[in-house]
Amino acid sequence: MTMEDSRNISKHVRIQMEIVSTCRELGIEAIQEYRGHDWRADVYVSNNDKPIAFEVQLSPQSLKKTLERQSKYIRDGVIGCWFFENPISKLNEERPDLPLFFVEDKEDSKLLVNLGDRRKIELHVFLENFITNNIQFKSLAKTKTIQTVNLIFYELEMS
């Protein structure tokens, strides 16, 4: 086993444990290395009527293979959520049928989810929002016709 292999195994386990721990904090059961009909998820979350299979893919995997695996989740009514370390070749744009995100390891050992141009957030914050359906793929964002904005002013003392 190479040093790179052991680093990936360690990161793979860290990400799995972060998923399990976040689910426990939310009061949701999470099972590592769960076996489905003809698939295996790194972490499976039986999230009420929206079960989720989390996949941690740190080694290279083709878009074709990823879509094949994703189709099994879709077939079984499971949301497949993928965490990759590196971009997939031939995946040029976001796809609503393939929730795929990139995980980065920071110097302070925090795991961050890279949301592209938008921003990076801590993995546990991403997970809390993904599991509770606060992160969704939308091709169009709609807002209310009338918006309410609260402005709060604070007095600033200049020295």
Image: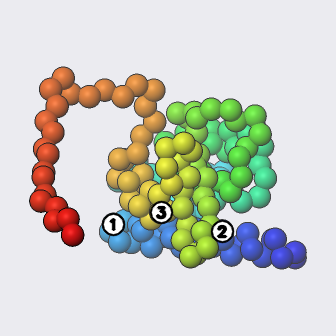
Residue visible at 56% across and 44% down in the picture: 116
Residue 81 placed where, x, y %? 55, 50
Give the residue type at disc 1.
Answer: Leu
Q: CA distance from mark 1 to mark 3?
A: 16 Å
The extreme right residue here reads 1
Residue visible at 16% across and 61% down in the picture: 156
Residue that label 1 marks: 26
Q: Nearer the viewer, residue 75 or 148?
A: 148
Residue 29 occupies quadrant: bottom left
Residue 17 occupies quadrant: bottom right
Secondary structure type for disc 3: strand
Residue neighbourhood size for the residue with mark 3, other residues' Cα within 10 Å, grouped as few (<14), some (14–19), many (≥20): some
Q: Nearer the viewer, residue 39 or 140?
A: 140
Q: Nearer the viewer, mark 1 or mark 3?
A: 3
Left or right position of 40 against 151? right
Give the residue type at disc 2.
Answer: His
Left or right position of 53 against 56? left
Q: Is residue 41 visible?
A: no
Residue visible at 47% across and 58% down in the picture: 121
Q: CA distance from mark 2 to mark 3?
A: 16 Å
Residue that label 3 marks: 122
Instruction: Tell me whether circle 2 and circle 3 mark residues in contact (CB < 8 Å).
Output: no
Residue 80 placed where, x, y %? 55, 47
Secondary structure type for disc 2: helix
Give the residue type at disc 3.
Answer: Glu
Q: Is residue 138 visible?
A: yes
Quadrant, the C terminus: bottom left
Residue 42 occupies quadrant: bottom right
Residue that label 2 marks: 12
Q: Earlier in the sequence, mark 1 or mark 3?
A: 1
Left or right position of 83 against 47? right
Quadrant, the N terminus: bottom right
